[in-house]
């Protein structure tokens, strides 16, 4: 099977990889590039655990072929913290205990970051609808929502 | 063995599709195609990714009419204020598809060519008299959206053809559309019934033009002229609403499945059509 050469940018770093055409972006992130923060929950775009940003758009990396990343800028959960400094969303998830098993957490954080980048002051309803594609089987969502709204307030300087 | 190619022009894409041996699939947002690849429901030999073609994604306005590129993601459609003003029903239908993540990729052409009877954007597009421009080995043709899906998973497109853009006409004054779907939860589900209604009113509030389309109650989305006839020439009085409700119910040819029984779908189709008509009327009266 012929492999494709793909040039992309991942978390600001120019990145190249070889991949077979049927591999998803998630497959390559995890298995080739060893960026295992993005999780494989459903492989059908239902759970959001594999959420990444592509050119500033939130997408499921399981619903995108790796070859489609050619020429595009990808941001993953690994790009959220600055070294040892957690992003406010990450800190608030810890403070509010907005995670239990943690499997959905990277996707929720990437999706929440995408929301706050567009809308620094979302309502609870807007937040719940925005995150409807991120499934969590532990928390019941309330703590997640509280953490996101609290992080938004902190980012606004309140 | 699967191959992938991303042509940079419409002509190159057509040439590749026309010359493909085996099964070729056109890739737009991929939110249906990748799921089908993974499950083995489709086993193509070639994937032709159209997203490198200039203009295939994006929205252009010309004298009040709109051109929507085939691969334009739902999120981009939702952010286009001028389109939302002119065609609120089309935009709300496109934005109902999947999650925020799915909206980042999913396109109108994909929703149409996946040919699910429950596709949310399709009833709204048909109600809007949307057309699509198809490119193929014999050149380009423009056809109504309702001529594309021929049954679940089947389209009228030939193997060398793909959709390059959608056209939405300029709106007369006092015109608006609406789309409603029934699902048993608030987000992230597939329509049990969908209803798209587009109306134009005269200055007195009487309907001069109407289109009513139902989704998920037949093998394809269905245009219901009898339902439109119940509206035309009338204001939205109780007699018109009752006639609309009955016409929508009579047009249903649904299946029983896990999402709803024949009886339930038929009943809900009447209710959704009626509610969508009320919303379309209210919107039309405001403009």
Image (cartoon, coloured by chain):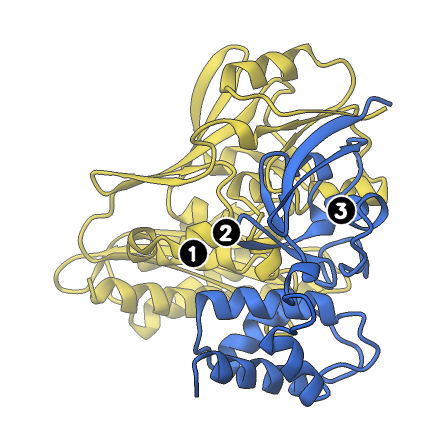
Chain colours: A blue, B yellow
Secondary structure of the residue carrying numbered label 1: helix
Q: Residues within 10 Å of mark 2 (few under 14, many from 20)?
A: many
Q: Which mark is residue B74?
A: 2
**Same chain for the residues under marks 1 and 2 in the image:** yes
In percent of the image, x 61 and y 20: which residue is there? B158
- Real-space CA distance between mark 1 and mark 2, rounded to the nearest whole angstrom: 6 Å
Residue in front for this viewpoint, B126 or B252: B126
In percent of the image, x 42 and y 65: which residue is there? B276
Q: Earlier in the sequence, mark 1 or mark 3?
A: 3
Q: Earlier in the sequence, mark 2 or mark 3?
A: 3
> Contact, CB < 8 Å: mark 1 with mark 2?
yes
Pointer 2 chain: B
Q: Which mark is residue B78?
A: 1
- Real-space CA distance between mark 2 and mark 3, rounded to the nearest whole angstrom: 18 Å
Q: Is residue B48 above or below residue A104?
A: above
Residue in front for this viewpoint, A73 or A119: A73
């Amino acid at each position: 099977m012929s492999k494709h050469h793909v040039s992309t940018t991942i978390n600001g770093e120019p990145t190249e990889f070889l991949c077979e055409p049927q591999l998803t972006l998630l497959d390559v992130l995890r298995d080739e590039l060893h960026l295992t923060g993005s999780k494989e929950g459903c492989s059908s775009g239902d759970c959001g655990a594999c959420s990444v940003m592509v050119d500033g758009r939130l997408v499921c990396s399981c619903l995108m072929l790796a070859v489609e990343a050619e020429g595009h800028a990808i941001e993953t959960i690994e790009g959220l913290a600055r070294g040892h400094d957690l992003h406010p969303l990450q800190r608030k998830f810890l403070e509010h205990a907005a995670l239990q098993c943690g499997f959905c957490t990277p996707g929720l954080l990437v999706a929440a970051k995408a929301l706050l980048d567009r809308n620094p002051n979302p309502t609870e309803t807007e937040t719940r609808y925005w995150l409807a594609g991120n499934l969590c089987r532990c928390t019941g969502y309330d703590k997640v929502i509280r953490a996101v709204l609290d992080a938004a307030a902190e980012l606004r300087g309140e | 063995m699967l191959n992938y190619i991303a042509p940079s022009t419409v002509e190159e894409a057509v040439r590749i599709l026309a010359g493909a041996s085996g099964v070729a699939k056109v890739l737009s947002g991929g939110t249906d195609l990748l799921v089908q690849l993974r499950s083995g429901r489709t086993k193509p030999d070639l994937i032709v990714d159209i997203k490198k073609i200039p203009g295939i994604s994006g929205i252009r306005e010309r004298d009040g009419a709109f051109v929507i590129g085939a691969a334009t993601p739902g999120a981009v459609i939702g952010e286009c204020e001028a389109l939302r003003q002119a065609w609120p029903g089309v935009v709300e239908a496109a934005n109902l598809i999947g999650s925020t993540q799915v909206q980042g990729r999913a396109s109108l052409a994909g929703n149409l060519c996946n040919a699910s009877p429950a596709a949310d954007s399709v009833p709204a597009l048909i109600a809007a008299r949307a057309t699509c421009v198809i490119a193929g080995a014999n050149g380009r043709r423009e056809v109504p959206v309702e001529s594309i899906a021929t049954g679940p998973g089947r389209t009228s497109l030939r193997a060398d053809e793909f959709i390059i853009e959608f056209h939405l006409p300029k709106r007369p004054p006092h015109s608006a559309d609406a789309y409603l779907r029934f699902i048993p939860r608030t987000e992230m589900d597939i329509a049990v019934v969908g209803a798209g209604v587009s109306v134009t009113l005269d200055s007195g509030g009487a309907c001069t033009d109407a289109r009513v389309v139902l989704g998920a109650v037949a093998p394809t989305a269905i245009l219901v002229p009898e339902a439109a006839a119940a509206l035309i020439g009338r204001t939205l009085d109780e007699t018109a609403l009752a006639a609309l409700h009955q016409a929508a119910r009579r047009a249903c040819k649904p299946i029983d499945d896990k999402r709803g029984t024949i009886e339930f779908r038929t009943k809900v189709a009447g209710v959704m059509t009626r509610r969508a008509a009320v919303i379309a009327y209210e919107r039309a009266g405001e403009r």
